[in-house]
Image: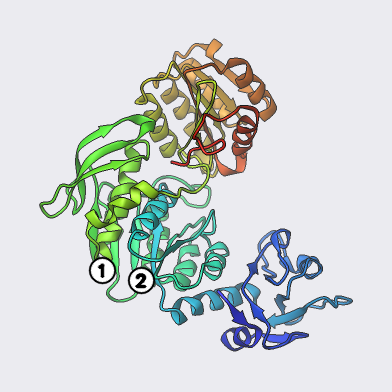
Amino acid sequence: MKYTIAEICRITGAEAEGLHPGTDIDGWSIDSRTVQPGDIYFSIVGENHDGHRFAPESLRKGASAVVVRRDFSLPNEKNGGLLRCDDPLETLHTLASHSRDEKGLRLVGITGSCGKTTTKDITAAMLGSSLNTGKNKGNLNNTWGLPLGMLRRPPGLDIYVCEMGMSYAGELRRVTSIARPEVAVFTNIHGVHLMNFKSMREIAEAKAEMLEGVPPGGVVVANADDPEVMRIARRSGLRTITFGVENEADLTAAGIEDRGIDGLSFELKLEGRAPSVASPLPGLHNLQNVLAAFATCVALGFAPEVMMNGLDNLDMSPARTRLVRFDDGWTLYDDTYNSNPQALRLTLETIKRSNGYERHIAVLGDMLELGAGEVEEHIKAGRLIAGMGIDHLIVVGPLARHMAEAAIEAGMNSASILIADDKKATLEALDGQIRPGDLVLIKGSRGVKMETIVEELTRRYPAAQGSGGGSKER
């Protein structure tokens, strides 16, 4: 999006200092490390940092302006100007919200404990077959990232699909007041972020905050297989379209053929129709995500048959169910973006159903943000792993160690388990163990940075021909 300095001041109430009112701004940043010449930098104040510290650095890197509090002093900086305001974060929010209204943007908001990014990617691909569609990138889904993503979106979009995350009560209320989605999608509610909540009910109530921003005439898309989702959907008073597999729903699936990591096929049942669908996404959990995307398209007035081509043109976010096939005959399943007990269980079930591989190897890192029950959740995961047909298990991190110990107690051969001290030890173990025909899963919470193992493996091993230079996005 592009605004002049004068327009930004008019919209937000900020006051310009050392800036020409006609200067165009179309680059937006909240991180001085990523500032590009001509950007505007917002000096966000958080619990543990103050972005004003990096305002001088941003100007030295060529930012056209920095947004700062009115009382901020910036001596001896001559390479850029200031936009003074009461609160840089509120200024970011106001500008993003204005951009949505001014451009008449239609918006879909997706939240949930698991699957929201994948559902976003599928939905954007489906809608992209008929509309000029955009989506928020990476983890730009919270009170800082979502408005930043909205300002960075390309001009001329018909519709914008965004995941909306939260880590604490009140965050989604703030995010949805900016986005105001005409379709609110709830994938599921599970016990993640329990470090900030006491119960699943509290998590559900925090997710329900998204409904407060849905305008009159908006639609809720709800997972009929999730009782907490259905509880908050029923009380919304909004038109609701449901999807599911286990319970009665508006959109459901029959004749499901699950091929593990190689995808699945099914008949999409909706109002007496049953078109055949082939999805490249692995696992039955991704069936729910595909159904949620179809339901979202129906909520927007599109027939599923029209949207089906989008499944052939998926642009998936990095480190989510990505397959990398290598020259020497083994396959990497990269699911390193995040992990929690439910997501890990579903991924392990997908691996178990994946045929045609000599051995299944799981490289698992800590699952974070599980609150007081974090050790017990890792113990439960270890017991689960012992019954999943995993041939070799490598764990990384102090919490993941409990997985390994519990797997041994549950009967898994200790000789097939390695508790790695660090990622270097993990790579050394894999180098000495991988052989043709192996399927290697790598998964862990974002804070553990398991993606660094994937990056090193794809650097060391040549990719199979046609795999896109080291990866095949799925």
Q: CA distance from mark 1 to mark 2?
A: 9 Å
Q: Position of residue 312 (x, y in %)?
A: 35, 47
> Which of the 4 image quarters holds residue 129?
bottom left
* Closer to the camera in the image, 344 or 356: 356
| Residue placed under numbered mark 1 in the picture | 238
Left or right: 190, with 301 as reference point = right
Q: Is residue 309 above or below residue 54?
A: above
> Which of the 4 image quarters holds residue 281?
top left
Q: Position of residue 84 (x, y in %)?
A: 71, 82
Q: Is residue 350 visible?
A: yes
> Under tag 1, what secondary structure?
loop
Classed neighbour count for the residue bearing mark 2: other residues with Cα under 10 Å, few (<14), some (14–19), many (≥20): many
Left or right: 443, with 449 as reference point = left
Q: Earlier in the sequence, mark 1 or mark 2?
A: 2
Q: Is residue 456 above or below residue 199?
A: above
Q: Given the current orientation, which residue lies at the most extreme right position?
A: 76
Number of numbered tags placed on the structure image: 2
> Which of the 4 image quarters holds residue 265?
top left
| Residue placed under numbered mark 2 in the picture | 214
* Closer to the camera in the image, 243 or 212: 243
* Closer to the camera in the image, 382 or 246: 246
Q: Is residue 228 visible?
A: no
> Under tag 2, what secondary structure?
loop
Classed neighbour count for the residue bearing mark 1: other residues with Cα under 10 Å, few (<14), some (14–19), many (≥20): some
Amino acid of disc 1: Leu
Q: Position of residue 66 (x, y in %)?
A: 72, 74
Q: Position of residue 474 (x, y in %)?
A: 43, 41
- Residue at the spot x=50%, y=80% of the render? 98
Amino acid of disc 2: Val
- Residue at the spot x=30%, y=71% of the render? 218
